[in-house]
Each structure stands twice: as structure tokens, then as C-alpha cells.
Image: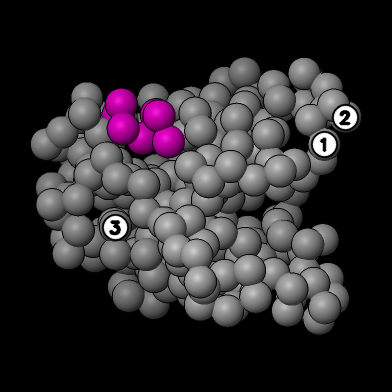
Amino acid sequence: MANYLIIGASSGVGKALAWQLANAGNNVFGTYYKNEIHSDKPLIQFNHLNVLDETIALDFLPETIAGIIYCPGSINLRPFERIKPADFTNDYNLQVVGAIKVIQSVISKLKNSENAAIVFFSTVAVQTGLPYHSQVSASKGAIEGLTKALAAEYAPKIRVNCIAPSLTDTPLAASLLNSEQKKETNAQRHPLKRIGTTDDIVNMAEFLLSTKASWITGQIMHVDGGISTLKI
């Protein structure tokens, strides 16, 4: 049994991962911002947290944390000329500065663990240029850089990895998949001819947290149906 902290555990991948880790017998401490959630599972505890606050409090955590999973993100796809500089800043604060605050707040608790890991989330669009993705790619590109820097700084004590999915069927991507035609069109863009599911991402996250990934750090894991590397 291990203790895990999931930032953004009220929906999508964060919620599914919380349930999966708890079902495996782990203690899960999840946070939510807008979507308050309660659990009938005694191994899951949800707490309110706004990572955009100047200071954040994570005093509900035990002294040892085996893993941090940072899920907050946004998908804003617009032409570059229509994006205000403040929009880039807002995304950066949510997806990068928020992650920095969380990790700095609990790094000592991670160091107490025998198998400590951090998992971030990026996007296939960082390393595969896609039109209208400048806003999301800018902040997620910073996350990929942070992943490698922290992996180097905290090796061998803490492993740090990042998952870079393609389009996945979660509430965050609902506007891009709100019709069967959109789902089918997006599925056909991928060599494996389907869009991602929460299980695809959660299974990779659980693996990266586990001792099975004990020799993996500083990696950007592309769980993307082959779209980043294959043309067929």
C-alpha cells in the first residue's frame, strides 16, 4: 500500500486513476477545484485546492508520498493571431506554475518514499507540430522541459516522467468529440484508427508510478495511437 497525490482528481484521467489506484489497495489523496466529488471508497480522500492561489496548503497529506500526478490542463485550439498574450500566461500558470507549487510543497514527503515518482501530462502536439495548437503546445512544452530537468536533479531518489497523449475521450476534449462524425474523423487520423480512452492513459500512469518502471525516468511517453511517429 502506498500514498498517492492526484491533483485534478474530479474528472477524466485523474478520476479514473484515483479509482484504479484505490482498487489496487493504495491510499489516494485527490484534489478538485470546481467539480466537488465525494467517494464511498475509504481509501480515497478528496480535498479542495486551487493551484492558482498565491500559496497552496497540502497539510492533509501524510509524511510519506509515493507519487504525485498533476492533471490540470486545458485544450484551447485557435488561430495564433486570435490568442491574447494573457491566454498563454493563464495556461502557463495553470499547467506549469501550479505543478511547481505542488511539487515544492511536498518534495520532502516524496523523498521519504522508497519508490517515489512524479507523472506529468503533455500533448502529442509539442513534438509534432499541429496547426492551432500554439497555446497548448507552449505550456506543455515547458512541462516536458521541467520533466527532464527534475528527473536529472532528483535522480536516483525520485523518478519523473511525462505522458504525451493524442486526442483522448475525456471531458476536457468534449467539444472536439461531441458528434459521431468528429469521433470517426479523429479516429481515422491515427494509425491505430481510434481515439484514446481514459484506460489507455491511466494504465500508463499506473505503470510509471509502480516499481515495474523503476529504471525509467526523464521520459516523454507517447500514448497516441502512433500518430507522432507513423504515417500510413
Q: Is residue 182 left or right of residue 206?
A: right
Could you say which is closer to the camera, residue 200 or residue 2? 200
Q: Which residues are magenta?
A: 144-150
In the image, what residue type sits under mark 1?
Pro
Q: CA distance from mark 2 to mark 3?
A: 37 Å
**In this figure, which residue is indicated by the disc labeled 3?**
208
Give the Cα distance between marks 2 and 1. 6 Å
Residue at 82 percent across and 40 percent down: it is 78
Q: Position of residue 224 (x, y in %)?
A: 49, 63
Q: Amino acid at mark 3?
A: Leu
- Identify residue type, mark 2: Arg
Instruction: Name the image quarter holding residue 20.
Output: bottom left
Quarter of the picture holding the N terminus: bottom left
In front here: 29 or 142?
142
- Residue 127 bears which disc, if any? none
Tell me the tag on residue 79: 1
- What residue is shown at x 39% (from left), y 70% (from top)? 203
Q: Are marks 2 and 3 in contact (CB under 8 Å)?
A: no
Q: Is residue 41 visible?
A: no
- Magenta stretch: includes residue 45: no
Q: Position of residue 61 (x, y in %)?
A: 39, 43
Of the image marks 2 and 3, the number of the one nearer the N terminus: 2
Residue 105 in percent (x, y) is at: 41, 27
Q: Return the residue at label 2.
A: 82
